[in-house]
Image (spheres, grey):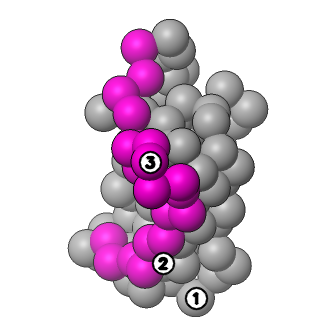
Amino acid sequence: RIHRHSGPEAWYTLSGETCLETPAGTMVGRAGGPPVIVPQGPPMELTATGKETRRALVLILHDSTQPHTLVATDWQPKGLCTK
């Protein structure tokens, strides 16, 4: 599902691999690698990649008066995470 967050999101991958596509390109979180940090606002699509089950510690910081996740209908990914 294509979505955006009302605050920054960060995740640290414990196992597996996750590819995140935004209008700016892709970011990949891998087990043991650096955390992925996404600023507030851009639309994104998350794809579990790799051969292991994805497990990650995720944190979304947002104003409690705003929903943490919103469906985004103003952008379509190019499928960069599936290539």
Category of crowding for the residue at label 1, using alpha-carbon neighbours closer than 10 angstroms: few (below 14), some (14–19), many (at least 20)? few
Residue topped by disc 3: 65
- Where is residue 23 drawn, in percent x and y? 66, 26
* Badge 3 element: loop
Above or below: residue 32 compared with residue 44? below
Q: Amino acid at mark 3?
A: Thr
Q: Which residue is mark 1?
A: 32
Identity of the amino acid at label 2?
Thr
Q: Residue 13's mark?
A: 2
Q: Identify the image quadrant of the N terminus.
A: top left
- Which residue does the image show at 67% across and 62% down from the upper left? 37
Q: Earlier in the sequence, mark 3 or mark 1?
A: 1
Q: Nearer the viewer, residue 46 or 70?
A: 70
Counting residues from the start of the chain, the first of labels 2 and 3 encountered is 2
Tell me whether the residue at label 2 lies in contact with that at label 1, contact meaning CB atoms closer than 8 angstroms: yes
Whole-number angstrom distance, CA of label 2 to CA of label 3: 28 Å
Q: Which amino acid, mark 1?
A: Gly
Q: CA distance from mark 3 to mark 1?
A: 34 Å
Q: Say whether residue 11 is left or right of residue 42.
A: left
The Cα–Cα distance between marks 2 and 1, rounded to whole angstroms, is 7 Å
Badge nearest the viewer, 2 or 3: 3
Q: Position of residue 13 (x, y in %)?
A: 48, 78
The first of marks 2 and 1 along the sequence is 2
